[in-house]
Amino acid sequence: MRQRIAARRAAVAVLLRVENRTRGTVLATRLKAALTSTARRRGLLGCDGLEPGEGLWIAPCESVHTFFMRFSIDLVYLDRKGCVRKLRCAVGPWRLSACLTAYSVLELPAGTIRATGTERGDRLEIVPADQNSEKIEAT
């Protein structure tokens, strides 16, 4: 058991990139993935903000809250095929948001949706940032 816990803590993840295939724009170049129960619960709590190009992909996830957060975020809800099901711009602290038809959600810096022209129905693709991308500790 201790070995598994130690292995998880030492795990390294590759940064991801989010591309809007419909519009030919990039939503994030330094996206972290929250794919474990612990990482999904933690989300962006404790963060002071997101820089342009940063973000968090939470999967599976159909609802989020911004309780205890100190900054606004954009939310992009995706189905399993990467199709945008719902968008929420500049969601402030102490809010709830849900999309029951979503499989996952992207949490991005406020203003990203408008800056990239992303709309409901667009097809997004999440790919490794690049072969030489910096490594981060898994969340």
Image (spheres, helix red, strand yellow):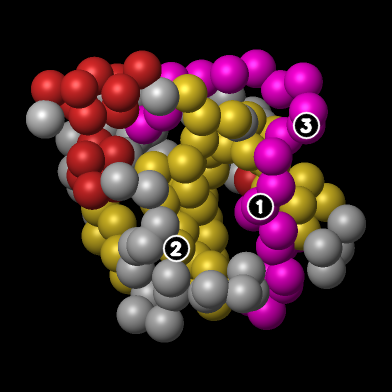
For numbered disc 2, what is the local secondary structure?
Answer: strand
- Residue plotted at (47% across, 41% down): 33
Which dot marks residue 130?
Answer: 3
Describe residue 61's horizontal placement relative to residue 49 as left or right: left
For numbered disc 1, what is the local secondary structure?
Answer: strand
For the C terminus, the image quarter is: top left
Which dot marks residue 126?
Answer: 1
Chain part drawn in magenta: 113-139
- Residue plotted at (44% across, 63% down): 104
Residue 78 drawn at (x, y percent): 53, 68
- Residue plotted at (44% across, 74% down): 102
Residue 138 drawn at (x, y percent): 41, 28
Identify whether 9 is placed above or below 80: above
Q: Which residue is mark 2?
A: 104
Q: CA distance from mark 3 to mark 2?
A: 22 Å
Residue at the farthest right position: 24
Earlier-in-chain disc, 3 versus 2: 2
Q: Nearer the viewer, mark 3 or mark 2?
A: 3
- Could you classify mark 2 by the number of other residues whose Cα lies within 10 Å: few (under 14), some (14-19), or many (20 or more)? many
In this view of the protein, can residue 54 be seen by the observer?
A: no
- Could you classify mark 1 by the number of other residues whose Cα lies within 10 Å: few (under 14), some (14-19), or many (20 or more)? some
Q: Are marks 3 and 1 in contact (CB under 8 Å)?
A: no
Residue 121 drawn at (x, y percent): 68, 79
